[in-house]
């Protein structure tokens, strides 16, 4: 063996033996857990390399909400990972997919208690935490299980809150008291949170008038460094806007607001409150997402002219109301924001009225508009009119997505016309547009 070893020259060794550490870490970064485990067994150097912080900064832990032998080890492996590499974590996302029964929610709660406890003790660098769509108001979450989970989460946020830059609890569905308790945990012992991004869309249960809660105003008053805030319209009030103006005017860039038909949205908000915030937060842009809130009277109470609106999404989710008309919104309300609107998304059932002309005029009036998406009953020639306006420099779209509803099962005629339109404007489409147009039977 000694003689054979003497004969081995450096050039005969594998190139992997001389690969720099930075290159090895980059290769290992692309591997899944199972492949990383196998690679760690190759040699001592590779084993040591597996403890590089670069490999474990980002983590998505997924728990299946249905009992299965395949998913039985998910809970154990999650705890193992946090104990082994949790100290390196900077960005953590946790998913719990559609829990099937109380046994699984209990198992998730117990696992999360251990996971968050271990992470709270070993980690001092977590910047981002996302736990979405838990829907804690569902019956599969018994009161004691829900309370225990909220207690564990609040205690964890108290420990790591000073490091946390991003928190996403979208879809948690908590009561006002529970939700405010969790939010207040971020400012524990400091009376302020320096988190820059907060997503509390659908964070509170439906039907709650959060805007009238002193607890909520107090909790939101602790945030002093917000750059982006996502929430529901049932949280918006003059008091909240005043809080944002006082504490976040120098940093605030984006507010995303969802308004759902089942959320209270009849509160009165003064235009001067929005005007003051827009005046002091000079970079502020507001994005609205409306779900089944489509009537002009309701929209006009919400979309005040003082708001620096960047994008608007209006979705009726296939619901049709013959007494409802979209025309006043397109002609009178939305043009109010023609100087700031950059994105428009429409999805509605307008089978009872034609809106091609109104939509075309709206696009032409919004000179900053670069994104337009619509699912509606339209004439196929509507697409050609938009492309012709784009060619003539009357609009500056970069994305055009159209789903043309029809009342027939067969769309052969529409498909042929759309192909002809594409051939006619192919050069324009290929060079300037993210383009998707289709005819869709709405039966």
Image (cartoon, grey):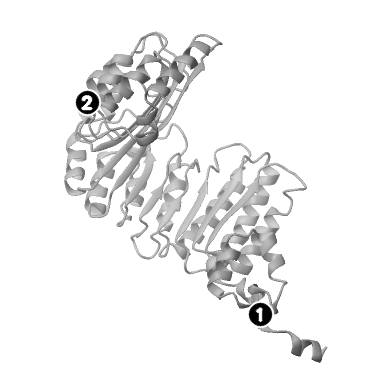
Q: Mark 2 points at which residue?
A: 365
Q: What element carries label 1?
A: helix
Task: Return the x and y of residue 241 as percentages of the image width and height.
Answer: 25, 43
Q: Which residue is drawn at 37% across and 25% down?
A: 425
Q: Residue at x 60, y 58 (%)?
A: 113
Of the residues under marks 1 and 2, which one precedes in the sequence?
1
Which quarter shows the N terminus?
bottom right
Q: Name the residue under label 1.
A: 11
Q: Which mark is residue 412?
A: none
Task: Return the x and y of residue 136 as percentages of the image width and height.
Answer: 55, 42
Is residue 121 visible from the viewing direction of this image? no
- Marks 1, 2: nearer the viewer: 1
Give the side of residue 122 with respect to residue 228, left or right: right
Give the side of residue 430 with respect to residue 133, left or right: left
Task: Return the x and y of residue 253 as percentages of the image width and height.
Answer: 28, 48
Task: Return the x and y of residue 367 as percentages of the image width and height.
Answer: 22, 31
Q: Which sits in the foreground, 397 or 428? A: 428
């Amino acid at each position: 063996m000694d003689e054979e070893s003497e004969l081995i020259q450096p050039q005969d060794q594998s190139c992997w033996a001389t690969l720099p550490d930075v290159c090895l870490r980059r290769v290992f970064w692309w591997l899944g857990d199972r492949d990383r485990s196998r690679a760690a067994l190759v040699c001592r150097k590779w084993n040591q390399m597996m403890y590089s912080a670069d490999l474990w900064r980002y983590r998505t832990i997924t728990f299946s909400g249905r009992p299965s032998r395949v998913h039985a080890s998910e809970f154990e492996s999650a705890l193992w990972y946090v104990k082994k590499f949790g100290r390196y974590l900077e960005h953590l996302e946790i998913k719990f997919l559609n829990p099937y029964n109380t046994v699984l929610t209990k198992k998730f709660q117990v696992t999360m208690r251990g996971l968050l406890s271990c992470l709270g003790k070993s980690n001092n660098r977590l910047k981002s935490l996302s736990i979405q769509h838990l829907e804690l108001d569902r019956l599969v979450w018994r009161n004691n299980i829900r309370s225990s989970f909220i207690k564990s989460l609040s205690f964890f946020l108290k420990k790591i809150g000073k490091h946390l830059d991003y928190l996403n609890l979208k879809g948690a569905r908590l009561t006002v008291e529970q939700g405010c308790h969790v939010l207040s945990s971020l400012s524990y012992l400091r009376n302020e949170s320096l988190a820059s991004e907060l997503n509390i869309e659908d964070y509170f249960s439906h039907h709650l008038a959060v805007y009238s809660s002193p607890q909520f105003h107090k909790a939101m008053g602790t945030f002093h460094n917000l750059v982006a805030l996502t929430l529901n319209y049932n949280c918006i009030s003059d008091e909240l806007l005043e809080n944002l103006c006082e504490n976040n005017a120098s940093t605030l860039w984006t507010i995303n607001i969802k308004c759902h038909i089942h959320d209270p949205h009849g509160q009165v908000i003064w235009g001067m409150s929005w005007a003051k915030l827009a005046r002091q937060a000079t970079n502020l842009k507001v994005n609205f997402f409306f779900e089944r809130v489509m009537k002009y009277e309701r929209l006009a109470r919400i979309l005040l002219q003082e708001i620096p609106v960047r994008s608007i999404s209006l979705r009726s989710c296939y619901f049709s109301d013959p007494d409802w008309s979209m025309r006043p919104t397109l002609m009178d309300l939305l043009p109010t924001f023609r100087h700031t609107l950059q994105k428009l998304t429409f999805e509605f059932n307008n089978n009872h009225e034609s809106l091609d002309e109104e939509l075309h005029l709206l696009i032409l009036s919004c000179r900053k508009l670069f994104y337009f998406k619509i699912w509606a009953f339209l004439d196929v020639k509507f697409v050609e009119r938009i492309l012709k306006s784009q060619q003539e420099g009357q609009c500056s779209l970069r994305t055009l997505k159209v789903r043309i509803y029809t009342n027939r099962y067969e769309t052969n005629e529409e498909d042929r016309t759309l192909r002809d339109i594409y051939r006619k404007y192919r050069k324009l489409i290929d060079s300037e547009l993210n383009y998707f147009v289709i005819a869709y039977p709405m039966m």
